[in-house]
Image (spheres, rainbow, N blue to C red):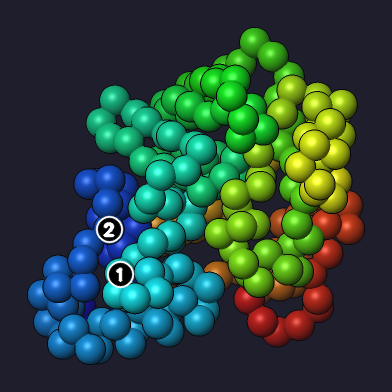
Amino acid sequence: MNLNLSSLHHILLKGIVENGYAPSIETLSINFQRTKQDIMQCLKDLEEYHGVVLHPKTSEVWIIHPFSLSPTNFWVETSKCQWWGNCAWCSLGIAAILNEDVTITTTLAGESKQIKISIKNGQIITDQCLFIHFPIPMKNAWDNVVFTCSVMQIFLSEIDIDNWCKRHNFPKGDIQPIENIWNFARIWYGNHLQQDWKKWTNEQAKSIFEKFNLTHNIWDIPPTDSRF
């Protein structure tokens, strides 16, 4: 197997989906029949491409969206396996990649009240209205992507979001019904397991945002040739 950004991304995600954790650098070296130094360099290139987040001291995988390999506020499980999602958007992205029934366990606003969200036959099953808050502008998302993901939380109402922002001194961003972000996530993460995966260009990302009426200035990204 040739070692490149797409093939490495595919093997990492495939391993996480099947096992619940990412293959190690040593395992990747064996799979690709390349030196550990080659694997580490390709991982660093993939991180520069914003396809992965590595542990600063070891170059092992920490985050590969939509999966986190360390505990978060979003626990996603099927009858076969379990995973951590980085945020509300990512947890829905995991469900989209798996394309099977899942249960997401989280706490409202990242605080104390736990809720469970079921997705069955492609539909969100919940007995209450749920909203996702996006306080960080997308153009700044990768300045500190761990922080960006950590504040994409689920709420019961806009009033709850207003109170949360005041309580924690956060700016108020865009608010979206969870059903819209679920449909959005199915498109956004729909290509992630493909062997020829590439990140969306900024223009492609803007087009997808517009398709789901994500028109708040939080979703503004520069019209460049770079990838989001």
Quadrant of the image occupied by residue 24: bottom left
Please tell me whether residue 218 is drawn above or below residue 58 in the rendered image: above
Quadrant of the image occupied by residue 155: top right
Q: Are there few (<14), some (14-19), or many (20+) residues within 10 Å of tag 2?
A: many
Residue under label 1: 60
> 77 left or right of 151?
left
State if disc 1 and disc 2 touch (CB < 8 Å): yes
Q: Are there few (<14), some (14-19), or many (20+) residues within 10 Å of tag 1?
A: some
Residue at image position (28%, 45%) is 20
Separation of residues labelled 2 and 1 (CA atoms): 9 Å
Residue at image position (52%, 79%) is 49
Q: Report if residue 222 is visible in the image.
A: yes
Q: Report if residue 123 is visible in the image.
A: no
Where is residue 30 shown, x and y percent of the image?
10, 75
Tag in front: 2 or 1: 1
Which amino acid, by three-letter code, is at mark 1? Glu
> Which residue is nearer to you in this view: 87 or 186?
87
Which amino acid, by three-letter code, is at mark 2? Ala
User: Quarter of the image containing the C terminus?
Assistant: bottom right
Please tell me whether residue 185 is drawn above or below residue 220 in the rendered image: above
* The label number, if any, that marks residue 22 in the structure image: 2
Where is residue 62 shown, x and y percent of the image?
38, 62
The disc, 2 or 1, on the residue closer to the chain's N-terminal end is 2
> 79 left or right of 90?
left
Where is residue 137 shown, x and y percent of the image?
78, 61
